[in-house]
Image (spheres, rainbow, N blue to C red):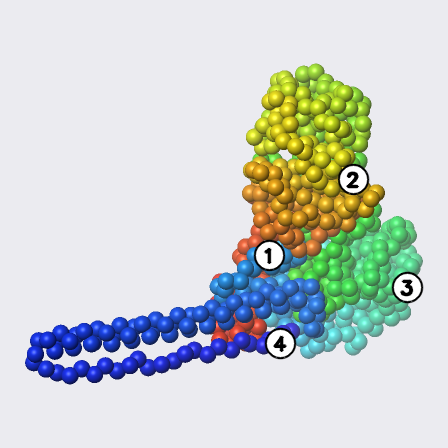
Amino acid sequence: MEIESRETETRAVEADPPAARVGLTRARVLRIAMVLVVVGAVAAAVGFGWAYETERAHATADVRDAAAAKLYARSQLQLSGLSPGGGDDVAAMQMLLAARAIRSSVPGDDYLLAALNQERELTKVIDTQAQVMSVAFSPDGTRIAAAGSDAAVRLFDAPSGQPTGAPLRGHEGVVTAVAFSPDGTRIATCGADSTIRLWSVGTGQPIGQPLRGPDKGLLSVAFSPDGSRIASASGDGTIQLWDTATAQPVGQPLLGHDGGVTRVVFSPDGHRIASGGTDKTVRLWDTATGQPVGQPLLGHDGWIMSVAFSPDGTRIATGSFDKTVRLWDPTTGQPIGQPLHHNSAVAAVAFSPDGTRIATGGADNAIHLWDSATGSALGALSGHHSAIESVAFSPDGRRIVSGSDDQTVRVWDASSGQPLLGHTDMVISAEFSDDGQRIRSGSQDGTARYWDATTGHPIGQPLRVTGPVKWLIPFGDDRLLSRDDSAVRLWDARTAKPIGDPMHVLNDPMLPSAAWYEKTGRIVVQAEPGAIEVRDANTMATVGMPIWPRKPVMGFDLSPDGHILATSSTDSAIQLWVVQTGKELREPLKGNGMIIQVSFSPDGHLLVAGSQGAVDNTPNTVRLWETLNFKPVGDPIRFDYAVLATAFSRDGKLMATGSGDGTIRLWDVGRHTLIGAPLAGHTEPVTALDFSPDGTKLVSASVDHSLRIWPVPTGSPETLCAKLTQNMSREQWKRWVSPQIDYVAACPGLPIAGDGTH
């Protein structure tokens, strides 16, 4: 896409230094005078040159500042889709990086963080210079194959996104489909020229002669699980099996579709073939006999554009022009559950390797993720600027590759924001371990769980304790805290035996009853009949004096040094208490509405409070105070829904807020500004948040029984460069940046578009 730019012009001041005339004389005085004159002339020349260089430097700085300001502004138009011709996130990222590379004085961290947050799931974008009709991961996940509208097939290194060799050429028209053999050594492609071609992955050379199909073009190709056969689907309504060793057809064409066959796929055991077509039917075939299996699967109201078997072969997913995805039982031929609805035609569908998720793509330019068991929407991956033609999961299920009419292949983090499922009731706590490798969660289902922070998979079995509990929360690796109707109790997680006596608490489910502070080794309890007590987590002995708030406490937090306790209540007040004496530190801080929770920053220098607006139209807000003098930091931040959870990154530079609508927002604490769009995925209110120790991840918990792990932008240009596969071209630099500023490759190590240099 061309983005028009109006360049800023500057004029450099040029002048010749004055000449000095010196006469020769034998008199020493005149020689001295001559020296003085020469020195003066040189000094004048140097002074003039310094002024000239200073003025030129100022002019150059002005050009750079103007160019950077323009680039930052235009990058935001591109990211928001408000630029003429629509959005282009690749151009936006290149503009942001160029603005940083030209070393202007215009600040750009906010723009960079916003872009990284918006592009958080994108790991790589690859320009193919042609519409991408089909994509596939190699069986080992190291390569990606893409079939293009320009009669070429391209192979890319999956981690870097760089091409591995020249495009594979031989087809005489659009290449409609590509598939890797099960052993990863061959690629099969088919196209509008009605041929199937086999290629060596290692050499990029064709294997044998093309296999010729019917004259109406081939639309789909698939390898059998053992690699001995290929199935092809034709626009004339037939399916043909081929022997990969002899390159000969196996049996007669499979007949039955009343129209073109758009997709064909083998079952995982190789005994069945599923096909979809323009006749709006899905059909099953016996691969040994070539005969239909059962009746056609009916239900779609439009062309079937994609078909996929689940990894265990017990389900089939289909995508259609009728804007729906349907699941089928291949044994009975009956639909499973209700259709999954898109906003537009569905062209691609794929199961994750573990069968728990389905990825779909189509004319709405987004990849949608679904829970294959419940049909629940799990989120969407947005970034393509035109229809998505193909999607595929990596073998490990952690990445998704997509191909689009926008001439790009994109690789996505398939685990970003995906739910960690296992709890059967509200999750009320979530935190990272000190090494960031695990996540601990507690729930009202009476269990505590541990999760792998990288994969999201559960670690071991859920932890339980004896007797009925309203909730159970893990603290550290060796303690559990539970609550029953009237008391909270500490447990040894390894032996499931209680530690000390129960601590009786207020019997009000709407009020927080206890919290653990691992850094200080303290437990805070809202005890009966309303006092707040601080206990030693090892001995259960009381620390300091009881604290008596004026009203029932809605939220509380202990300062990092364990000396101050902040409490909030329904009267819009935040009280600060000295733990040792039980006395108030100062007069209460005034907030807005009902203050649901309060939190100290990791260094204790800030206090944040989240509130719920009252019936008098008081807004939902988040507010910050400096703890040195307890002065407010900026104005209250308004929200559409109550803020129920907050968390600071370990360095205190970022803050996360979780709301009643299930969304999460990231904030730059120093600038008091929002970073990017909300993180959406939870279907119920957010109850807890925690940053990983290195600040690269955020875990959230929700009333919807799930946890989610989100990537956190670091603000590093290198992070943005890692998503790209090339720098902007020199011609783009002239148009987007300025012809008056020398070209800079903003991403060292990446080729420059158009000339392939680095």
Q: Earlier in the sequence, mark 2 or mark 3?
A: 3
Q: Tag 4: residue type?
A: Glu
SS for tag 4?
loop
Q: Amino acid at mark 3?
A: Asp
Q: Nearer the viewer, mark 3 or mark 1?
A: 1
In this view, the mark in front (1 or 4): 1
Q: Residue 343 location in percent, x, y?
A: 83, 61
Looking at the image, which is closer to me, 746 or 620?
620
Callout 3: helix, strand or loop?
A: loop
Q: Callout 2: few (<14), some (14-19), or many (20+) C-alpha neighbours within 10 Å?
A: many
For the residues labelled 3 and 1, the Cα–Cα distance comes to 47 Å
How far, Cα to Cα, is label 1 from label 4? 24 Å
Residue drawn at x 62%, y 45% as measured from the top left: 633
Residue 488 seen in render: no
Q: CA gap, disc 3 to disc 4?
A: 44 Å
Place of residue 654 in the rendered image (x, y in percent of width and height, measured from the top left): 61, 46
Identify the mark nearer the N-term, 3 or 1.
Answer: 1
| CB-based contact (under 8 Å), mark 1 and mark 4 | no
Q: Which residue is mark 2?
A: 703
Give the labeled residue for mark 3. 301
Of tags 2 and 3, the one toward the viewer is: 2
Can you say whether 648 is above or below 57 in the image?
A: above
The local crowd at label 4, few if under 14, some if 14 to 19, many if 20 or more residues have their Cα within 10 Å, is few
Residue 616 coordinates in the image, percent (x, y)? 82, 44
Q: Which residue is mark 1?
A: 110
Q: Is residue 266 above or below residue 588?
A: below
Q: Nearer the viewer, mark 1 or mark 2?
A: 1
Q: Nearer the viewer, residue 577 or 288?
A: 577
**Local SS, label 1:** helix
Amino acid type at circle 2 is Val
